């Protein structure tokens, strides 16, 4: 398969997906959790086993069935529960806690471990620090790859990373999945993970260029991607199997909504990162080199 030959279709597919994501962001935005918008956190020790369906049915009486729930414990038998809801009044909090004490008689007043209101200021600080971390990571990668390879390689790699971040954000906007602080951690994790496959391919391109001087650049790029393909796919599949297991566990057994979001963002990021390393980064570098060559020839002709 010629990866370079289909690059424009790959570029078009990614551009349409990102454009759709931008439209979705403009129309419905992101579903920000209380880590960003502020809200109320209630931490209870129920003193006995419980199911998430049971908890949601109880919260539904107070129109809070969509609350973020997290089981605390070493396994799916943990007795502690963290509830995160938008800001509610003191009376609503007391009513909810009272309902839990009625449903779980072993609870006492001391088993209400935490009841706090979280302000949106923390969310603003988290967002600012996340963008700063992204900018510093991109700048550091740009500098290192420029020194290790060349500036065009560095720009292509950072473009692929930006592509992955935008794809993840687009999917979370499409389906209105809740965004919380683990989502930020997932984005930073993907940046570090995704760059690995891109660097492997770029390193193979550089080696083949040195070893086969004078050979057509398109063939070198295609062969370099093909030679790295099995390694990239096998690494990604291994990670995907683990993440799928975690996602299923968090969705149906453990019930940790925060870790479910983390696993979901990583799943999308791993797939997008593998795709961008193969179809975006190296083909974009090739297109840049070809454009530069044509422009140079045009100047010489003039």
Image (cartoon, rainbow, N blue to C red):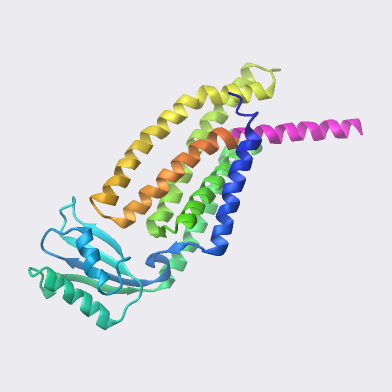
Q: Residue at x 43, y 64 (%)?
A: 32
Boundaries of the magenta span: 282-302
Q: Is residue 107 above or below residue 51?
A: below
Please provide percent x and percent y for residue 278: 54, 33
In the figure, residue 268 lies in which quadrant?
top left
Foreground residue among 273 and 175 = 175
In the figure, residue 119 lies in which quadrant?
bottom left
Q: Is residue 72 left or right of residue 179?
A: left
Please provide percent x and percent y for residue 203: 55, 28
Q: Is residue 119 above or below residue 219?
A: below
Q: Residue at x 45, y 30 (%)?
A: 233
Look at the image and say whether residue 284 sits in the magenta stretch: yes
Can residue 295 be seen at all in this image of the molecule? yes
Q: Is residue 15 left or right of residue 241?
A: right
Q: Quadrant of the C terminus?
A: top right
Foreground residue among 132 and 248 = 248
Q: Residue at x 41, y 57 (%)?
A: 177
């Amino acid at each position: 398969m010629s990866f370079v030959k289909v690059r424009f279709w790959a570029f078009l597919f990614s551009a349409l997906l990102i454009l759709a994501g931008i439209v979705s962001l403009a129309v419905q935005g992101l579903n920000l959790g209380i880590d960003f918008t502020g809200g109320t956190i209630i931490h209870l020790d129920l003193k006995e086993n419980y199911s998430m369906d049971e908890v949601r049915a109880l919260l539904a009486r107070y129109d809070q069935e969509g609350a973020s729930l997290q089981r605390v414990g070493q396994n799916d038998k943990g007795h502690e529960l963290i509830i995160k809801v938008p800001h509610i009044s003191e009376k609503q909090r007391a009513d909810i806690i009272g309902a839990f004490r009625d449903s779980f008689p072993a609870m006492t007043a001391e088993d209400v471990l935490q009841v706090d209101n979280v302000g949106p200021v923390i969310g603003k600080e988290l967002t600012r620090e996340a963008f700063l971390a992204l900018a510093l990571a991109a700048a550091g990668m740009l500098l290192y790859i420029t020194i290790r390879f060349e500036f065009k390689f560095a720009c292509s790699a950072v473009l692929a990373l930006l592509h992955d971040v935008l794809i993840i954000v687009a999917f979370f906007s499409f389906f209105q999945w809740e965004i919380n602080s683990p989502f930020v951690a997932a984005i930073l994790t993907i940046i570090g993970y995704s760059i690995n496959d891109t660097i492997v391919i770029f390193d193979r391109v550089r080696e083949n260029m040195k070893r086969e001087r004078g050979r057509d650049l398109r063939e070198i790029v295609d062969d370099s991607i093909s030679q790295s393909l099995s390694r990239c796919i096998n690494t990604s599949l291994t990670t995907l199997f683990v993440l799928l297991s975690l996602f299923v566990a968090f969705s149906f057994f453990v019930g940790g909504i925060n870790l479910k979001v983390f696993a979901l963002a990583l799943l999308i990021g791993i797939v997008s990162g593998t795709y961008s390393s193969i179809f975006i980064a190296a083909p974009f570098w090739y297109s840049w080199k070809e454009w530069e060559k044509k422009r140079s020839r045009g100047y010489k002709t003039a």
